[in-house]
């Protein structure tokens, strides 16, 4: 049975088929099926090859991977049950169906990762804008066809794709961006009519991309500028450092990965070379991963410190970039319609709008968090205050248990304000509503000591007669009976 080469401790963490891996880049770079692992031999002595399982290894990084691989498993099962299928072949197909089902056990939480990737891209561009306001440009390109990028750079032949190592999402390397821009600039140079135009375009080409003496020497992989050497004054002018840095282009929206197909292999015809074999041929379908149409990428170019006129240099670079994206295409298979972009007029505006919306969301989240923290703080303070009041109330209750009736009355009377005290003085001698005996004694003590000013007021009111006069006389009599002497 085919398997992914890994140690037992790694398998315990990620699963024997890597089904617990949540990063496409890690899955595609490190954990793919090898068509001949482990080494096994058929009865004829030939090495067993699991070509299907190898192809399925990269098919499972697609967004619709589960559906694709389960369909492959179903097809293998159906073929194995056909009457004309040999037993050994049927057994092999059932084994491959089991592999397909196991490989389908991957899940991609794309929405959260895509939103995070887009936020990182916008944040990076915002930092560039802040640090280099006059030395950068940003062009937003929207895929109008599928994109095959880094197709040949993979453990599986012609089945690679450029994935960010952290997010596992597609991106376009800066080297690829520079390459297509340089190609577009060379095409413009070659199409120039007059010598003056060629001289100016050559100068612009050197200022953006830089050149070396190799570019002006005829050779198989060099010498693209041989015919333009005569527009330079001397050979020293052939060596120029480029003034523009081409940064990697990252998606600013959902960049979906899907599986495309190519059918270019005709083994019988390739073996015999006879045209008639083409009519009996059964082409081998080769799947490969691509970025789905509709993805938007932000292309950022930065003028480095060598640029004497950053604005003019970036203008030339922008012209080459826009031409490359809309007329030449980017990545592999451009002649087949892959890698073509449009330049949406609202591209930068949409980026800024997304940035503003994100900033508002962050501010709203911060305000809500602050409000929650303040509410929690108030609630905690209320709980602490309530706990303190409860503790104080229990302490007071415990303390009052050991107090005499007169001590309790003194404490009660001390809590009255002047108006409440005067009201009780008026009722001092009444049968209904009068204070209790202990409270009366406490009132006498208070009027002799702490409430002297209030006692003077009571005497003034008593001078006019009425109930207050009776109350004052009763207070004096009670004071004498308490052996406190005369009232002041």
Image (cartoon, rainbow, N blue to C red):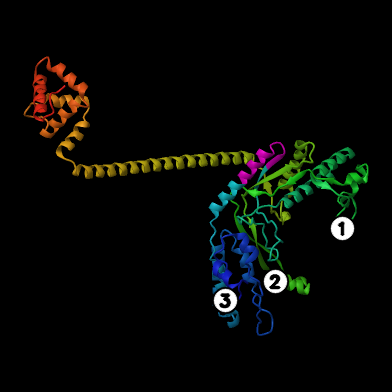
Q: What is the number of the mark on residue 192?
A: none
Secondary element under disc 1, as helix, strand or loop, is loop
Which is nearer the eye, 391 or 151?
391
Residue 55 percent location from the top left of the image? 64, 67
Q: Provide the residue designation for mark 3.
A: 95
Assign the C terminus to one quadrant of the image. Answer: top left
Q: Range of the magenta residues?
A: 121-138
| Sooner in the amino-acid sequence: mark 3 or mark 1 | 3
Residue 21 is left or right of residue 131, and the answer is left
Say which residue label 2 marks.
281
Quarter assignment of residue 457:
top left
Disc 3 to disc 1, how far (Cα)? 49 Å
Can I make out residue 16 in this image?
no
Q: Earlier in the sequence, mark 2 or mark 1?
A: 1
Q: Could you give the CA–CA distance between mark 2 and mark 1, rounded to whole angstroms?
A: 37 Å
Q: Residue visible at 68% across and 84% down?
A: 44
Please identify, in this view, whether the residue under mark 2 or under mark 1 is nearer the observer: 1
Q: Are there few (<14), some (14-19), or many (20+) residues within 10 Å of tag 1?
A: few
For this view, does 323 lie left or right of residue 471?
right
């Amino acid at each position: 049975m085919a398997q992914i080469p890994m140690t037992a401790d790694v398998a315990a963490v990620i699963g024997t088929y890597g089904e617990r891996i949540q990063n496409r880049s890690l899955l595609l770079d490190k954990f793919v099926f090898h068509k001949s692992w482990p080494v096994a031999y058929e009865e004829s002595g030939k090495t067993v090859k699991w070509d299907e399982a190898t192809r399925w290894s990269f098919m499972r990084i697609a967004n619709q991977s589960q559906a694709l691989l389960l369909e492959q498993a179903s097809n293998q099962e159906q073929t194995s049950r056909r009457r004309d299928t040999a037993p050994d072949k049927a057994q092999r197909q059932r084994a491959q169906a089991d592999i397909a089902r196991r490989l389908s056990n991957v899940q991609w939480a794309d929405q959260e990762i895509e939103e995070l990737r887009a936020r990182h891209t916008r944040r990076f561009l915002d930092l560039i804008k802040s640090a280099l306001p006059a030395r950068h440009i940003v062009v937003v390109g929207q895929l109008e066809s599928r994109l095959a990028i880094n197709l040949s750079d993979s453990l599986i032949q012609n089945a690679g794709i450029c994935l960010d190592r952290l997010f596992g999402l597609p991106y376009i390397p800066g080297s690829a961006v520079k390459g297509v821009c340089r190609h577009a600039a060379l095409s413009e140079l070659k199409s120039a009519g007059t010598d003056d135009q060629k001289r100016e375009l050559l100068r612009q080409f050197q200022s953006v991309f830089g050149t070396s003496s190799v570019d002006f020497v005829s050779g198989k992989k060099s010498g693209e500028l041989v015919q333009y050497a005569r527009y330079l004054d001397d050979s020293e002018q052939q060596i120029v450092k480029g003034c523009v840095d081409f940064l990697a282009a990252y998606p600013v929206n959902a960049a979906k990965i899907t599986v495309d197909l190519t059918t270019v292999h005709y083994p019988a015809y390739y073996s015999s070379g006879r045209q008639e074999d083409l009519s009996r041929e059964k082409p081998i379908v080769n799947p490969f991963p691509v970025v789905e149409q509709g993805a938007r990428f932000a292309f950022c170019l930065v003028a480095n410190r060598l640029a004497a006129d950053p604005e003019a240099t970036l203008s030339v670079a922008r012209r080459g970039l826009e031409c490359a994206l809309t007329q030449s295409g980017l990545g592999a298979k451009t002649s087949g319609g892959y890698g073509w972009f449009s330049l949406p007029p609202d591209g930068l505006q949409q980026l800024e709008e997304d940035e503003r919306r994100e900033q508002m969301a962050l501010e709203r989240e911060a305000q809500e968090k602050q409000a929650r923290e303040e509410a929690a703080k108030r609630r905690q303070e209320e709980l602490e205050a309530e706990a303190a009041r409860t503790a104080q109330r229990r302490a007071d209750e415990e303390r009052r248990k050991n107090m005499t009736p007169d001590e309790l009355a003194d404490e009660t009377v001390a809590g009255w304000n002047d108006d409440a005290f005067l009201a009780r003085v008026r009722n001092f001698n009444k049968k209904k509503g009068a204070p209790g005996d202990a409270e009366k004694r406490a009132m006498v003590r208070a009027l002799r000591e702490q409430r002297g000013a209030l006692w003077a007021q009571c005497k003034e009111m008593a001078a006019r007669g009425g109930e207050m006069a009776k109350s004052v006389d009763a207070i004096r009599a009670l004071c004498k009976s308490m052996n406190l002497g005369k009232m002041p």
